Amino acid sequence: MSLRRASLGFVFVNTSPPEERPFILKGLELLQLPEDSTEIQCGNIIKRYSYRPFLLKDICLADFASNFDTVKIYKKAKPKGKGKDLPEDNDDDNFEDDPYDTDDHDEGNASLVKLTNGDTIRKRKKKILRYVHYNIEKDCENYYREQLMLFCPWYTENKIIGKCQSFEERYEEVKDDVHQKKGEYEQNAEEIARAENNIQNFDSDNEDAYTDIATCIQHLNNNDADIVEIIDQNNNEDLYVNYDIGQNLGIRQTKADVDLASGNDNHEELLINRMADMEYRKLVQSFNTKQREIFLHILKSVKTLNDHFFIFLSGGAGVGKTKVTRGIYQALQRWFTRRPGDNPDTKYILLTAPTGKAAYLIKGSTIHSAFKIPANQSLTYKSLTSDKLNTLRKDLGHLQVVIIDEVSMLGCNMMNYINFRLQDIMSIRKPFGGVSILAVGDLFQLQPVKDGWIFLHCKKDYGLLASNVWKDNFKIFELTQMMRQKDDQQFAELLNRMREGKQTENDIKILKERTINTADQNYPYSSTHIIYNNHDVNSYNDKMFDLVKFTKITSHASDTVIGDIPDSIKHDILARAPHKAGDAMGLGKVFKTAVSLKN
Ligand SMILES: Nc1ncnc2c1ncn2[C@@H]1O[C@H](COP(=O)(O)OP(=O)(O)OP(=O)(O)O)[C@@H](O)[C@H]1O
């Protein structure tokens, strides 16, 4: 289960050796440090643990990280003027490293614990603990160091080893305590490790082991059989079936892979947050020649070139752009997290789209949210404050590839904004900060809203004088083979002819035959409607609402400000809340719905 959807929170402790741990630089307070000070890093869990007071001397890092959160102390101050003491966007304290863990508090709360560096923590609901998980066989010293670091109390990290010559030796001295403490966090850890080992060394002798760990195997086998059928329908079946993506990606070929290639599949990959290996391989095996070409080209660029790539993957409706993008995303995700100890949550690739709906369809993020671009504002580039930039760097600092779907809806000013934002995040003055871009879409489809086409010169930020990042950098790769099936295919071919203005008289006739008037008895009210402007959308929705005979509900929005802050500030915040739906990201004051209506 993805931990993002669990009811418990989780915390990741980076147990890599100190010299390999990334850190976040302090903001403006750096300027106030003495010249010879080396205290340039922001706080983090491990540092805070070493600052714990005597009262917590016996707790280990695992308990500390899992049980305690940092809190910000809110000093009650009398507001002097309108909006004067509104909470600020930036917190000028030492908690930039855990922006989502912090909580506001009054001074003098007895449940708070003060650390020796002045920070404050508070006991909260226990969180699930995640850490690097070194492999005892491949990296045993780091394995033992990690166990000691997490499950034995310490104050100075370089003294964890004690007087011993190796971490293993020290571990032997305290292993009973470590086991006991570890058991609280990892129940059945040894059995799971054994099962994982079995899966990796899968052979015919223990193939039944899968039924113990995955009871849904029969259901999956049935699904797989369907997918294999699709592969079999392909004219070049040998070519695809024998193509082994594993070799290309460094994934060892297992007995299960061989079985899969021969259609005899019974393998289930137990991985979190990504497509199962088996499904992924089948996806790649089903690519046609051109799809495979672009897929391999991108993989090769990532694996062999030090330089980045800018590719525009285009093609008409139904040529498989989305399908190939899914494959590329999965392949890159595996490539970037292939080393043992790589944190699977590190963002090396971003899957984005210009609108919420397009982002939802690819299970990605909108460009606005991924790059913290303010909505409803002019696209003149604004740098982030150093605190916000540090937070974003922490999240996206390892970025290697950005995939932008439905790129036709992305305007030239927005493209410019992304270019500058990535340069700021990566601190590299090269196009897109040295991050590769895969733009996917069809410029004959939807065009940008309130922005110019991507290939035009933008009019902001001296854009008319500058070169155009799209024209200067991007190379086009076009998919041409229509892959839609049966009835869909005929219609998609018609659309593709229209796309190029080459529609026939018969095409026009077919389209005209399909027009229907609202006065018609068979008018399909429940079909999706595309309406040109918001005003007509609202009238249509009101009409539908009136027509519905089932239970109707009308909700009126009411804005409230909660929190322990003075009333005058609450009023100020409320006064700033937008009233029009257009200013509130489409959220109106009245929401109407009814049983049987869908939005
Ligand atoms: N190599 C393939 N083998 C079998 N089916 C395929 C292949 N490539 C694509 N398809 C199928 O063709 C259909 C269209 O694919 P996809 O949605 O990826 O195309 P698209 O170019 O993104 O289309 P659109 O621009 O309309 O969104 C899907 O049903 C997909 O599963």
Image (spheres, grey):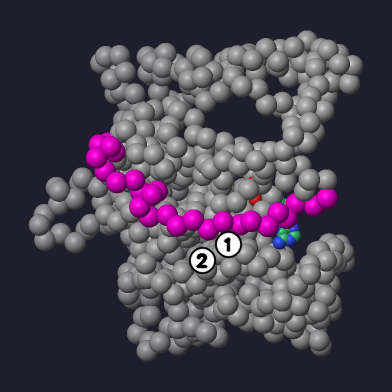
Which residue lies most toward the right here?
521
**Mark 1 beta carbon near ligand 1 (under 8 Å):** no
Q: Quadrant of the C terminus?
A: top right
Instruction: Report which residue position mark 2 lands on.
Output: 298
Residue ranking furthest to the front? 505
* CB of mark 2 near ligand 1 (< 8 Å): no
Query: Could you tell me the amino acid type at mark 1?
Result: Ile
In the figure, 387 relative to 284: above or below? above
Disc 2 is placed on an element classified as helix
Q: Locate residue 254: give its quadrant.
A: bottom right
Residue sitting nearer the eye, 164 or 205: 205
Q: Residue at x 40, y 87 (%)?
A: 166
In depth, the one of 327 and 382 nearer the eye is 327
Residue 251 drawn above or below residue 380: below
Magenta stretch in the rendered image = 461-486
Tally of numbered tags: 2
Circle 2 residues within 10 Å: few <14, some 14–19, many ≥20: many
Q: Which residue is identified by label 1?
A: 328
Mark 2 belongs to which amino acid? Ile
Q: Main secondary structure of the magenta part?
A: loop
| Residue 178 visible in the snapshot | no
Q: Are marks 2 and 1 in contact (CB under 8 Å)?
A: yes
Q: Nearer the viewer, mark 2 or mark 1?
A: 2
Element marked by disc 1: helix
Residue 245 left/right relative to 278: left
Residue located at (67% from left, 43% from top): 497
The answer to which quarter of the image holds residue 46 is: bottom left
Q: Earlier in the sequence, mark 2 or mark 1?
A: 2
Would residue 393 be counted in the magenta stretch?
no
Is residue 438 toward the left or the right of residue 505 in the image? left
